Image: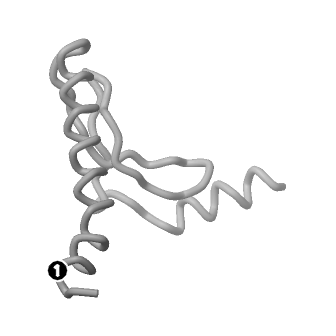
Amino acid sequence: MEARTIALMILAPFALFFIYAIIHEYRRYRSEGSATYGLVYDEESGTTHVTGIVDGEEGYDPEDFDPGDHNERQSRDEA
């Protein structure tokens, strides 16, 4: 196989996913208006993820995070 064909086979799924994401976000924008995205902390799992943030709420600030606090809450809940 030619190098171009191999490169196209590798990059095509990523390009298709990128195009799908653009279309999906555009349709969401048309129906709901602009959105604010940010980092959100999940207290149950102790993880963060990027998602839409509701108006009036603030995003998660990693500098304010204390990992020991999460572990202390878990031990208090278990006791």
* Residue 60 at x, y percent in the picture: 32, 48
Residue 71 lies in what quarter of the image?
Answer: bottom right
Assign the C terminus to one quadrant of the image: bottom right
Q: So how many labels did they put on this image?
A: 1
Name the quarter where the N terminus is drawn: bottom left
Out of 32 and 69, give the one closest to the viewer: 32
Q: Which residue is mark 1?
A: 4
Q: Position of residue 46 (x, y in %)?
A: 54, 57
Residue plotted at (43% across, 49% down): 41
Q: What amino acid type is highlighted by mark number 1?
A: Arg
> In what element is the residue under mark 1?
helix
Q: Position of residue 43 (x, y in %)?
A: 55, 48
- Picture residue at 25% right of the left edge, 68% below the top: 11
Q: At x 26% / y 62%, what residue is drawn?
A: 12
Give 57 or 26, whichever is nearer the viewer.
26
Estimate the x, y position of residue 16 in percent, counting from the top left.
Answer: 27, 51
Residue 53 falls in which quadrant of the image?
top left
